[in-house]
Amino acid sequence: MVYNSCIAMPIKMPAPLGERLLKKGLISDSELDIALAEHVKTGELLGRALIRLGFLNEEELCLTIS
């Protein structure tokens, strides 16, 4: 947990994108693994890799990150 040093209150950090997509059932573990490998190999953003690979569409991504 991260604390705001000004007021020493915990700040809830959002879960990583892959974790949120898995929790919503929008992608599978294997799809996440493939997209993460692409992200590491190319530097492409994870969301863009998931869309390019056909595992996710733009609307699903936008709803998840908003």
Image: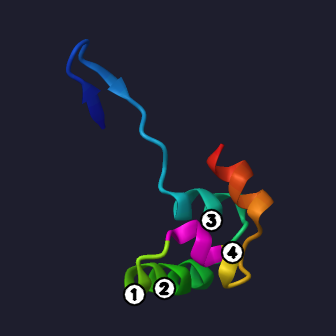
Please provide percent x and percent y for residue 33: 51, 83
Please provide percent x and percent y for residue 61: 69, 59
The residue positioned 68% from the left and 73% from the top of the image is 27
47 in relation to 62, above or below:
below
Amino acid marked by disc 3: Leu
Mark 3 and mark 4 lie on one chain; the one further toward the N terminus is 3
Residue that carries the numbered disc 3 in the rendered image: 22
Q: Is residue 55 left or right of residue 29?
A: right
Mark 2 and mark 3 lie on one chain; the one further toward the N terminus is 3
Amino acid marked by disc 4: Ile
As measured in the structure, the alpha-carbon distance from the residue carrying label 1 to the one carrying label 3 is: 22 Å
Q: Which residues are magenta?
A: 45-50
Labels 2 and 4 touching (C-beta < 8 A): no
Please give the label number shown on residue 41: 1
Please give the label number shown on residue 51: 4
Residue that carries the numbered disc 2 in the rendered image: 38
36 in relation to 13, above or below:
below
The quarter in which the C terminus is drawn is top right
Please provide percent x and percent y for residue 45: 50, 69
As measured in the structure, the alpha-carbon distance from the residue carrying label 2 to the one carrying label 3 is: 17 Å
Indicate which label's residue lies in the foreground, 2 or 3.
2
Estimate how packed mark 1 is, as few (under 14), some (14 to 19) or many (20 or more) residues with alpha carbons within 10 Å. few
Amino acid marked by disc 1: Lys
The residue positioned 71% from the left and 53% from the top of the image is 62
